[in-house]
Image (spheres, rainbow, N blue to C red):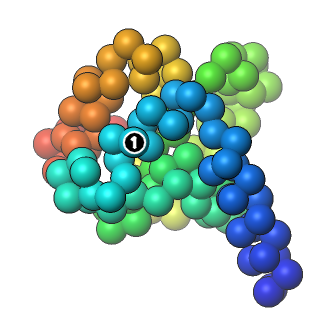
Amino acid sequence: MRGLRLAEARRARGLRRDQTEAERQLWRRLRNRILGGFKFVRQEPIGPYFADYVCREEKLVVEIDGATHSTDDERRHDAAREQFLRDRGYRVARFYNDEVYHNIDGILDTILAILERRQTL
């Protein structure tokens, strides 16, 4: 068990270090309770998966997808992953890199509305 946690921690550190530009931009707007006072962590291991961003207190997972989520196999994998998270009580909000680059304020408004339960998924 300890070895598994150590491997997860190493993988999470690597994912944080190698994040995409879109992930970097969104993280700057989510970290340190900037968004409505809600605390987010990044690259959180949940079962066999790593969630891009998680607000633990509200069980919200925020995923940022690039072009690698466009094939049928990738979409099936994403759907299975999302179902796994939902089965554990998480809500999942998924956005694309392009949205981060062109409408980050809209994304933040949507995330905040979900957190404040003004919008459902």
Q: Nearer the viewer, residue 115 or 13?
A: 13
Q: Residue at x 38, y 13 (%)?
A: 102
Determine the image quadrant of residue 121.
top left
Q: Residue at x 28, y 34 (%)?
A: 108
- Number of residue marks: 1
Residue 111, how many percent across, how many down?
29, 40
Determine the image quadrant of residue 65.
top right
Specify whether 103 is left or right of 86. left
Residue 21, how many percent across, how many down?
56, 28
Residue 13, how many percent across, how many down?
69, 59
Q: Is residue 86 visible?
A: no
The N terminus - image quarter: bottom right
Residue 83, how many percent across, how many down?
58, 47
Most extreme residue toward the right, as rendered? 3
Specify whether 2 is left or right of 100. right
Q: Residue at x 64, y 63 (%)?
A: 45
Q: Residue at x 42, y 36 (%)?
A: 26
- Callout 1, which amino acid? Arg
Most extreme residue toward the bottom, as rendered? 2
Crowd around label 1: few <14 · some 14–19 · many ≥20 (10 Å):
few
Please tell me whether residue 94 is drawn above or below residue 86 in the rendered image: above
Please tell me whether residue 82 is drawn above or below residue 65 in the rendered image: below
Q: Secondary structure at mark 1?
A: helix
| Residue annotated with mark 1 | 28
Please tell me whether residue 115 is drawn above or below residue 2 in the rendered image: above
Specify whether 93 is left or right of 73. left
Q: Nearer the viewer, residue 42 or 4?
A: 42
Q: Is residue 26 visible?
A: yes
